[in-house]
Image (cartoon, rainbow, N blue to C red):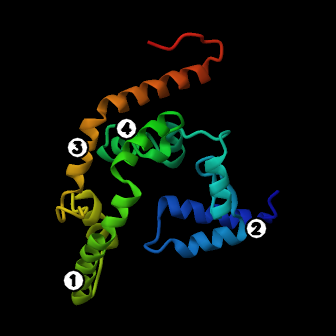
Amino acid sequence: MSTATAANIEEAEEIVTRLLTDPPQDPYPLYARLRAIDPIHRAAIGDFWTLTRYGDIHTALKDRRFVRDYDDFRRRNSRGRVDYNRPFIRSQRLWFVFYNPPEYIGKRALYGKAFTPTYVDELRPAIERFASQILDAAEARGRLDVVHELGYQLTLTGHLPHPRSGVGQGRGALRRVGARHRAHLRSACHRGDAAQGRRRDPETRRLPP
């Protein structure tokens, strides 16, 4: 049961509205304030719940009564009509966080074949060297764009280090794994679609075509 006062709820709504419409460069003080005054807030601006405590988020993600619905998420978090043809939107729909079991399980298993605990441990020294190079250059310049210069360069440009082959080979490893297990992925996706169909219509006895 929420213990937030009417004033707390009003302030929380102002914070969520700002985070959606005019986010500051450093949003963490707003997150902290929201967590202090109304950690489970029903946002009127998009008609969604905002959770800011780790325990609450962890519980919601583990509770099978909650499902992930990308279209609903995007509708509630966007102002106006959503352009689903935007490259970012098309990419975001594929994020694991928006998949439900059992389809999620098959996709996660696919990546698990590439990113084994041993492989991830081997990546650590190469990533540390690459990150140190970026940070040293940023220190010399006196500035750092964390998203573009660190996050983007380290992940999206193919600079993910490969412990045996050097920088830039991470994507190649994923392509090889993807080609080898494409049939497995198609099978997992089909099982996921079939299960979703059964959930929508409990009386269905046969798998969808």
Q: Return the residue at label 4.
A: 84
State whether residue 86 appears in this view: yes
Q: Residue at x 31, y 35 (%)?
A: 181
| The C terminus, quarter of image | top left
- Taking depth in this image into account, of 89 and 156 the one nearest to the observer is 156
Q: Residue at x 67, y 67 (%)?
A: 11
Marks 4/3 in contact by CB < 8 Å: the verdict is: no
Give the mark nearer the N terminus: 4 vs 3: 4
Give the mark nearer the N terminus: 4 vs 2: 2
Q: Is residue 131 left or right of residue 191?
A: left
Instruction: Identify residue type, mark 3.
Output: Arg
Marks 3/1 in contact by CB < 8 Å: the verdict is: no
Of discs 3 and 2, which sits in the foreground?
A: 3
The x and y percentages for residue 193 are: 48, 25
Q: Within the image, what quadrant is residue 76 found in? A: top right
Q: Which mark is residue 7?
A: 2
The residues bearing labels 1 and 2 have C-alpha atoms spaced at a distance of: 46 Å
Instruction: Identify residue type, mark 2.
Output: Ala
The residues bearing labels 4 and 3 have C-alpha atoms spaced at a distance of: 29 Å
Q: Return the residue at label 3.
A: 176
> Is 206 rendered above or below residue 35?
above
Q: Return the residue at label 1.
A: 137
Instruction: Identify residue type, mark 4.
Output: Tyr
Mark 2 residue crowding within 10 angstroms, few (<14) / some (14–19) / many (20+):
few
- Taking depth in this image into account, of 28 and 116 the one nearest to the observer is 116
- Secondary structure beneath dot 3 equals helix
Marks 3/2 in contact by CB < 8 Å: the verdict is: no
State whether residue 79 appears in this view: no
The residues bearing labels 4 and 2 have C-alpha atoms spaced at a distance of: 37 Å
Q: Is residue 194 left or right of residue 169?
A: right
